[in-house]
Amino acid sequence: MSAAPAPSVPLSWPLLAAGTAAFFTLGVIQAMYGPAFGLFQARYGVSTAAVGLIASAHFLGSACAPLPVGLLLRVMSARAGTSWSLLVLALGMVGVVLAPTWPLAVAAAAVGGLGLGGVSACLNAAYASVGARAVNLVNAVFGVGSLVSPLLVTGLHAGLAGPFLTVAALCAVTFAVGRVWGMPEMLARAPETAPARPGVQAGLFGGLLVAYVGMEAGYGAWIVRYLTDHGIGGAALMLSLFWGALTVGRVLTGVFGGRAAPHRLLLACAAALVGLAGLALVPAWAPLAFLGAGLALAPVFGTTLAWATQSLSARLVPILLVAGSVGGVLAPAALGALLARFGLPAVPLGLGTLALLMGAFTLLARRGLRPGGAA
Protein backbone atom coordinates (compact mmCIF):
# COMPACT_ATOMS: atom_id res chain seq x y z
CA MET A 1 0.00 0.00 0.00
CA SER A 2 1.23 3.46 -0.80
CA ALA A 3 2.41 5.54 2.10
CA ALA A 4 0.82 8.67 0.69
CA PRO A 5 -1.99 10.19 2.71
CA ALA A 6 -5.46 9.51 1.47
CA PRO A 7 -7.05 12.22 -0.63
CA SER A 8 -9.67 14.17 1.27
CA VAL A 9 -12.60 16.35 0.32
CA PRO A 10 -11.63 20.05 -0.08
CA LEU A 11 -12.50 22.02 3.03
CA SER A 12 -15.14 24.72 2.73
CA TRP A 13 -17.36 26.73 5.02
CA PRO A 14 -20.55 24.86 3.97
CA LEU A 15 -18.82 21.60 4.91
CA LEU A 16 -17.50 22.83 8.27
CA ALA A 17 -20.26 25.25 9.34
CA ALA A 18 -22.57 22.82 11.13
CA GLY A 19 -19.64 20.98 12.71
CA THR A 20 -18.14 24.23 13.95
CA ALA A 21 -21.40 25.25 15.62
CA ALA A 22 -22.06 21.77 17.00
CA PHE A 23 -18.63 21.13 18.49
CA PHE A 24 -18.53 24.61 20.02
CA THR A 25 -21.84 23.76 21.70
CA LEU A 26 -20.52 20.39 22.90
CA GLY A 27 -17.40 22.02 24.31
CA VAL A 28 -19.48 24.56 26.23
CA ILE A 29 -21.69 21.98 27.95
CA GLN A 30 -18.89 19.47 28.57
CA ALA A 31 -17.01 22.01 30.70
CA MET A 32 -20.05 23.68 32.30
CA TYR A 33 -21.04 21.42 35.17
CA GLY A 34 -17.93 21.88 37.32
CA PRO A 35 -18.09 25.70 37.38
CA ALA A 36 -21.85 25.46 38.05
CA PHE A 37 -21.55 23.21 41.14
CA GLY A 38 -22.04 26.18 43.46
CA LEU A 39 -25.24 27.15 41.67
CA PHE A 40 -26.62 23.62 42.02
CA GLN A 41 -25.76 23.55 45.71
CA ALA A 42 -27.45 26.89 46.29
CA ARG A 43 -30.62 25.85 44.49
CA TYR A 44 -31.05 22.27 45.68
CA GLY A 45 -29.19 22.34 48.99
CA VAL A 46 -27.02 19.33 48.14
CA SER A 47 -23.66 18.69 49.76
CA THR A 48 -20.25 19.04 48.19
CA ALA A 49 -19.97 15.26 48.15
CA ALA A 50 -23.28 14.86 46.29
CA VAL A 51 -23.13 17.70 43.76
CA GLY A 52 -20.65 15.86 41.53
CA LEU A 53 -23.38 13.33 40.79
CA ILE A 54 -24.90 15.62 38.18
CA ALA A 55 -21.64 15.75 36.21
CA SER A 56 -21.32 11.97 36.51
CA ALA A 57 -24.85 11.56 35.15
CA HIS A 58 -24.00 13.80 32.21
CA PHE A 59 -20.83 11.86 31.38
CA LEU A 60 -22.61 8.53 31.82
CA GLY A 61 -25.26 9.60 29.34
CA SER A 62 -22.64 10.74 26.84
CA ALA A 63 -20.71 7.46 27.22
CA CYS A 64 -23.86 5.36 26.70
CA ALA A 65 -24.94 7.13 23.50
CA PRO A 66 -22.36 6.09 20.86
CA LEU A 67 -23.15 2.36 20.88
CA PRO A 68 -26.89 2.65 20.10
CA VAL A 69 -26.18 5.56 17.75
CA GLY A 70 -23.70 3.39 15.85
CA LEU A 71 -26.44 0.79 15.39
CA LEU A 72 -29.00 3.42 14.37
CA LEU A 73 -26.63 4.80 11.73
CA ARG A 74 -27.21 1.58 9.82
CA VAL A 75 -30.81 2.65 9.20
CA MET A 76 -30.68 6.46 9.41
CA SER A 77 -28.41 9.16 8.07
CA ALA A 78 -25.83 11.00 10.15
CA ARG A 79 -27.75 14.18 9.30
CA ALA A 80 -30.94 12.84 10.88
CA GLY A 81 -29.05 11.40 13.85
CA THR A 82 -27.38 14.74 14.51
CA SER A 83 -30.66 16.65 14.32
CA TRP A 84 -32.49 14.33 16.73
CA SER A 85 -29.51 14.31 19.10
CA LEU A 86 -29.46 18.12 19.16
CA LEU A 87 -33.12 18.04 20.18
CA VAL A 88 -32.38 15.58 22.99
CA LEU A 89 -29.48 17.74 24.20
CA ALA A 90 -31.63 20.89 24.19
CA LEU A 91 -34.45 19.13 26.08
CA GLY A 92 -31.95 17.94 28.67
CA MET A 93 -30.66 21.48 29.21
CA VAL A 94 -34.16 22.88 29.60
CA GLY A 95 -34.89 20.04 32.01
CA VAL A 96 -31.87 20.96 34.15
CA VAL A 97 -33.17 24.52 34.44
CA LEU A 98 -36.80 23.61 35.16
CA ALA A 99 -36.28 20.55 37.38
CA PRO A 100 -38.01 21.16 40.74
CA THR A 101 -35.97 18.52 42.58
CA TRP A 102 -32.37 17.32 42.61
CA PRO A 103 -33.10 13.80 41.28
CA LEU A 104 -34.96 15.28 38.30
CA ALA A 105 -32.06 17.66 37.60
CA VAL A 106 -29.65 14.71 37.63
CA ALA A 107 -31.95 12.76 35.29
CA ALA A 108 -32.15 15.75 32.93
CA ALA A 109 -28.36 15.99 32.89
CA ALA A 110 -28.21 12.32 31.85
CA VAL A 111 -30.67 13.05 29.01
CA GLY A 112 -28.51 15.96 27.92
CA GLY A 113 -25.47 13.69 28.01
CA LEU A 114 -27.22 11.23 25.70
CA GLY A 115 -27.82 14.06 23.26
CA LEU A 116 -24.20 15.20 23.45
CA GLY A 117 -22.96 11.66 22.85
CA GLY A 118 -25.28 11.29 19.89
CA VAL A 119 -24.15 14.52 18.25
CA SER A 120 -20.50 13.61 18.82
CA ALA A 121 -20.91 10.11 17.43
CA CYS A 122 -22.77 11.20 14.28
CA LEU A 123 -20.53 14.14 13.42
CA ASN A 124 -17.26 12.37 14.22
CA ALA A 125 -18.35 9.54 11.91
CA ALA A 126 -19.29 12.00 9.16
CA TYR A 127 -16.16 14.14 9.38
CA ALA A 128 -13.86 11.13 9.77
CA SER A 129 -15.15 9.87 6.41
CA VAL A 130 -14.30 13.29 4.92
CA GLY A 131 -10.68 13.22 6.10
CA ALA A 132 -8.24 13.94 8.92
CA ARG A 133 -8.12 17.69 8.33
CA ALA A 134 -11.88 18.15 8.70
CA VAL A 135 -12.28 15.99 11.80
CA ASN A 136 -9.33 17.67 13.53
CA LEU A 137 -10.58 21.18 12.78
CA VAL A 138 -14.08 20.64 14.14
CA ASN A 139 -12.72 18.90 17.24
CA ALA A 140 -10.45 21.91 17.82
CA VAL A 141 -13.58 24.07 18.11
CA PHE A 142 -14.67 21.81 20.97
CA GLY A 143 -11.68 23.11 22.91
CA VAL A 144 -12.69 26.70 22.24
CA GLY A 145 -16.14 26.00 23.67
CA SER A 146 -14.58 24.46 26.77
CA LEU A 147 -12.49 27.58 27.32
CA VAL A 148 -15.55 29.86 26.98
CA SER A 149 -17.83 27.76 29.21
CA PRO A 150 -16.62 28.90 32.66
CA LEU A 151 -16.98 32.51 31.56
CA LEU A 152 -20.63 31.89 30.72
CA VAL A 153 -21.31 30.45 34.17
CA THR A 154 -19.62 33.29 36.04
CA GLY A 155 -20.39 36.15 33.67
CA LEU A 156 -24.11 35.86 32.94
CA HIS A 157 -25.21 36.34 36.58
CA ALA A 158 -28.46 34.54 35.79
CA GLY A 159 -28.25 31.46 37.99
CA LEU A 160 -28.62 28.10 36.30
CA ALA A 161 -30.96 29.47 33.64
CA GLY A 162 -28.35 31.66 31.95
CA PRO A 163 -25.67 29.11 31.02
CA PHE A 164 -27.88 26.06 30.46
CA LEU A 165 -30.49 27.88 28.36
CA THR A 166 -27.58 29.33 26.38
CA VAL A 167 -26.61 25.76 25.48
CA ALA A 168 -30.20 25.03 24.44
CA ALA A 169 -30.09 28.16 22.26
CA LEU A 170 -26.78 27.03 20.76
CA CYS A 171 -28.45 23.73 19.83
CA ALA A 172 -31.10 25.71 17.94
CA VAL A 173 -28.39 27.79 16.25
CA THR A 174 -26.57 24.63 15.21
CA PHE A 175 -29.77 23.19 13.76
CA ALA A 176 -30.39 26.44 11.86
CA VAL A 177 -26.82 26.45 10.53
CA GLY A 178 -27.38 22.89 9.34
CA ARG A 179 -30.55 23.92 7.55
CA VAL A 180 -28.75 26.77 5.78
CA TRP A 181 -25.44 25.09 4.88
CA GLY A 182 -26.37 21.45 5.36
CA MET A 183 -25.34 18.82 7.88
CA PRO A 184 -22.37 16.67 6.86
CA GLU A 185 -23.11 13.12 5.81
CA MET A 186 -20.95 10.02 5.89
CA LEU A 187 -19.26 9.60 2.53
CA ALA A 188 -19.79 6.24 0.88
CA ARG A 189 -16.28 5.32 -0.25
CA ALA A 190 -14.84 2.04 -1.35
CA PRO A 191 -12.21 1.02 1.22
CA GLU A 192 -8.73 2.07 0.11
CA THR A 193 -7.32 -1.00 1.83
CA ALA A 194 -9.11 -4.18 2.80
CA PRO A 195 -7.80 -5.75 6.01
CA ALA A 196 -7.73 -9.55 6.01
CA ARG A 197 -9.51 -9.55 9.38
CA PRO A 198 -11.72 -6.45 9.74
CA GLY A 199 -12.73 -7.33 13.30
CA VAL A 200 -9.11 -7.54 14.43
CA GLN A 201 -8.34 -4.31 12.60
CA ALA A 202 -11.21 -2.54 14.35
CA GLY A 203 -9.86 -3.87 17.65
CA LEU A 204 -6.43 -2.40 16.90
CA PHE A 205 -7.91 1.01 16.16
CA GLY A 206 -9.96 0.70 19.35
CA GLY A 207 -6.81 -0.13 21.33
CA LEU A 208 -5.05 2.88 19.83
CA LEU A 209 -7.89 5.11 21.01
CA VAL A 210 -7.88 3.50 24.48
CA ALA A 211 -4.21 4.47 24.82
CA TYR A 212 -4.87 7.99 23.50
CA VAL A 213 -7.89 8.74 25.68
CA GLY A 214 -6.05 7.24 28.64
CA MET A 215 -3.20 9.69 28.11
CA GLU A 216 -5.49 12.67 27.63
CA ALA A 217 -7.46 11.85 30.77
CA GLY A 218 -4.30 10.93 32.68
CA TYR A 219 -2.57 14.21 31.94
CA GLY A 220 -5.75 16.12 32.75
CA ALA A 221 -6.19 14.32 36.06
CA TRP A 222 -2.62 14.34 37.37
CA ILE A 223 -0.73 17.37 36.02
CA VAL A 224 -1.72 19.59 38.94
CA ARG A 225 -0.92 16.99 41.61
CA TYR A 226 2.42 16.08 40.01
CA LEU A 227 3.60 19.68 39.78
CA THR A 228 2.24 20.70 43.19
CA ASP A 229 3.91 17.78 44.97
CA HIS A 230 7.19 18.76 43.32
CA GLY A 231 6.74 22.30 44.68
CA ILE A 232 6.28 23.85 41.24
CA GLY A 233 4.00 26.90 41.20
CA GLY A 234 1.29 27.69 38.67
CA ALA A 235 0.08 24.09 38.39
CA ALA A 236 -3.51 25.05 37.56
CA LEU A 237 -2.28 27.45 34.88
CA MET A 238 -0.13 24.68 33.46
CA LEU A 239 -3.18 22.44 33.16
CA SER A 240 -5.00 25.19 31.26
CA LEU A 241 -2.00 25.58 28.97
CA PHE A 242 -2.02 21.82 28.35
CA TRP A 243 -5.64 21.99 27.15
CA GLY A 244 -4.85 25.12 25.15
CA ALA A 245 -1.94 23.35 23.45
CA LEU A 246 -4.24 20.44 22.61
CA THR A 247 -6.67 22.84 20.94
CA VAL A 248 -3.96 24.73 19.03
CA GLY A 249 -2.43 21.45 17.92
CA ARG A 250 -5.73 20.27 16.46
CA VAL A 251 -6.03 23.49 14.48
CA LEU A 252 -2.50 23.02 13.14
CA THR A 253 -3.28 19.40 12.26
CA GLY A 254 -6.42 20.53 10.46
CA VAL A 255 -4.38 22.97 8.39
CA PHE A 256 -1.24 20.93 7.74
CA GLY A 257 -2.01 17.35 8.79
CA GLY A 258 -3.19 16.19 5.39
CA ARG A 259 0.41 16.24 4.14
CA ALA A 260 1.47 13.22 6.21
CA ALA A 261 0.41 9.58 6.00
CA PRO A 262 -1.73 8.78 9.06
CA HIS A 263 0.49 6.02 10.44
CA ARG A 264 3.60 8.16 10.14
CA LEU A 265 1.97 11.08 11.92
CA LEU A 266 0.72 8.80 14.71
CA LEU A 267 4.11 7.13 15.13
CA ALA A 268 5.78 10.54 15.33
CA CYS A 269 3.28 11.58 18.01
CA ALA A 270 3.86 8.37 19.96
CA ALA A 271 7.64 8.81 19.84
CA ALA A 272 7.32 12.43 20.97
CA LEU A 273 5.01 11.44 23.83
CA VAL A 274 7.45 8.79 25.05
CA GLY A 275 10.27 11.34 25.03
CA LEU A 276 8.16 14.00 26.76
CA ALA A 277 7.09 11.55 29.46
CA GLY A 278 10.77 10.89 30.10
CA LEU A 279 11.46 14.62 30.22
CA ALA A 280 8.70 15.06 32.81
CA LEU A 281 10.68 12.85 35.19
CA VAL A 282 12.93 15.89 35.67
CA PRO A 283 10.76 18.26 37.76
CA ALA A 284 12.30 21.45 36.36
CA TRP A 285 11.41 20.34 32.82
CA ALA A 286 7.97 18.93 33.63
CA PRO A 287 5.95 22.07 32.74
CA LEU A 288 7.55 22.22 29.29
CA ALA A 289 7.03 18.48 28.87
CA PHE A 290 3.32 18.77 29.69
CA LEU A 291 2.89 21.64 27.23
CA GLY A 292 4.59 19.56 24.55
CA ALA A 293 2.39 16.59 25.40
CA GLY A 294 -0.71 18.66 24.64
CA LEU A 295 0.67 19.44 21.19
CA ALA A 296 1.75 15.84 20.58
CA LEU A 297 -1.63 14.42 21.60
CA ALA A 298 -3.56 16.85 19.41
CA PRO A 299 -3.41 15.01 16.06
CA VAL A 300 -4.11 11.54 17.42
CA PHE A 301 -7.89 11.44 17.86
CA GLY A 302 -9.02 12.85 14.53
CA THR A 303 -6.23 11.20 12.54
CA THR A 304 -7.06 7.78 14.00
CA LEU A 305 -10.75 8.11 13.15
CA ALA A 306 -10.00 9.27 9.62
CA TRP A 307 -7.46 6.47 9.11
CA ALA A 308 -9.95 3.88 10.37
CA THR A 309 -12.55 4.97 7.81
CA GLN A 310 -10.07 4.33 4.99
CA SER A 311 -10.41 0.58 5.60
CA LEU A 312 -13.54 0.18 7.73
CA SER A 313 -17.06 1.56 7.55
CA ALA A 314 -17.53 5.04 9.05
CA ARG A 315 -20.51 3.56 10.90
CA LEU A 316 -17.99 1.86 13.20
CA VAL A 317 -16.71 5.22 14.47
CA PRO A 318 -19.25 5.39 17.34
CA ILE A 319 -18.12 1.92 18.45
CA LEU A 320 -14.51 3.11 18.43
CA LEU A 321 -15.55 6.08 20.58
CA VAL A 322 -17.01 3.68 23.14
CA ALA A 323 -13.77 1.68 23.13
CA GLY A 324 -11.74 4.85 23.61
CA SER A 325 -13.81 5.87 26.62
CA VAL A 326 -12.45 2.80 28.45
CA GLY A 327 -9.07 4.53 28.56
CA GLY A 328 -10.63 7.60 30.13
CA VAL A 329 -12.23 5.46 32.83
CA LEU A 330 -9.23 3.27 33.66
CA ALA A 331 -6.13 5.44 33.20
CA PRO A 332 -6.65 8.13 35.87
CA ALA A 333 -7.44 5.52 38.52
CA ALA A 334 -4.55 3.30 37.45
CA LEU A 335 -2.11 6.23 37.57
CA GLY A 336 -3.41 7.12 41.02
CA ALA A 337 -2.80 3.57 42.26
CA LEU A 338 0.71 3.59 40.80
CA LEU A 339 1.41 6.97 42.38
CA ALA A 340 0.29 5.71 45.79
CA ARG A 341 2.54 2.66 45.56
CA PHE A 342 5.63 3.88 43.73
CA GLY A 343 5.63 7.66 44.17
CA LEU A 344 5.58 10.60 41.77
CA PRO A 345 7.78 9.07 39.02
CA ALA A 346 5.02 6.54 38.39
CA VAL A 347 2.88 9.24 36.73
CA PRO A 348 5.15 10.07 33.76
CA LEU A 349 6.29 6.44 33.55
CA GLY A 350 2.67 5.30 33.30
CA LEU A 351 1.91 7.94 30.67
CA GLY A 352 5.02 6.92 28.74
CA THR A 353 3.86 3.30 28.81
CA LEU A 354 0.54 4.34 27.28
CA ALA A 355 2.47 6.19 24.56
CA LEU A 356 4.45 3.02 23.83
CA LEU A 357 1.19 1.07 23.58
CA MET A 358 -0.18 3.68 21.19
CA GLY A 359 2.87 3.27 18.98
CA ALA A 360 2.55 -0.53 19.10
CA PHE A 361 -1.13 -0.44 18.11
CA THR A 362 -0.25 1.95 15.27
CA LEU A 363 2.41 -0.42 13.93
CA LEU A 364 0.07 -3.41 14.17
CA ALA A 365 -2.75 -1.52 12.46
CA ARG A 366 -0.38 -0.51 9.67
CA ARG A 367 0.80 -4.11 9.30
CA GLY A 368 -2.79 -5.33 9.03
CA LEU A 369 -3.39 -2.96 6.08
CA ARG A 370 -0.39 -4.06 4.06
CA PRO A 371 -0.96 -6.44 1.16
CA GLY A 372 -0.46 -9.88 2.65
CA GLY A 373 -0.15 -8.46 6.18
CA ALA A 374 -1.80 -10.19 9.08
CA ALA A 375 -3.17 -8.11 11.89
Image (cartoon, grey):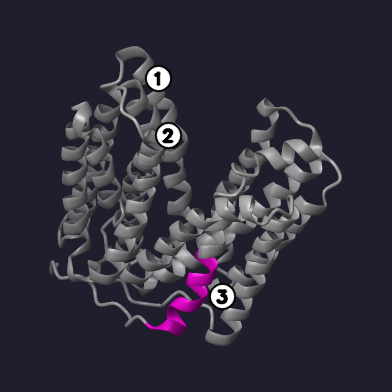
Cα gap from disc 2 to disc 3, whole angstroms: 34 Å
**First-in-chain label (3 vs 1):** 3
Residue that badge 2 annotates: 221
Residue shown at 58% from the left, 60% from the top: 118
Query: Could you tell me what secondary structure mostly forms the magenta stretch?
Result: helix
State the mark number for residue 79: 3
* Residue 225 in view of the camera: yes
**First-in-chain label (2 vs 3):** 3
Q: Amino acid at mark 2?
A: Ala
Q: Is residue 299 above or below residue 230?
A: below
What residue range appears in magenta? 12-23
The reply to whether callout 3 and callout 1 are in contact (CB within 8 Å) is no
109 magenta-colored:
no
13 magenta-colored:
yes
Tell me the quarter of the image containing the N terminus.
bottom left
Residue shown at 44% from the left, 77% from the top: 16
The location of residue 46, given as percent across then percent down, is: 76, 31
Is disc 3 placed on a helix, strand or loop?
helix
The location of residue 263, given as percent across then percent down, is: 20, 57
Q: Is residue 59 above or below residue 262?
A: above
Task: Please state which of the two labelled residues, at mark 2 or mark 1, is closer to the viewer.
Answer: 2
For this rendering, which residue is in front, 236 or 90? 236
Q: Could you tell me how many numbered marks the image carries?
A: 3
The location of residue 132, given as percent across then percent down, is: 31, 67
Residue that badge 1 annotates: 337
Residue shown at 31% from the left, 70% from the top: 133
In the image, farthest residue toward the right: 100
Is disc 2 placed on a helix, strand or loop?
helix
In the image, farthest residue toward the top: 341
Q: Is residue 236 left or right of residue 285?
A: right
Cα gap from disc 2 to disc 1, whole angstroms: 13 Å
Q: Amino acid at mark 3?
A: Arg
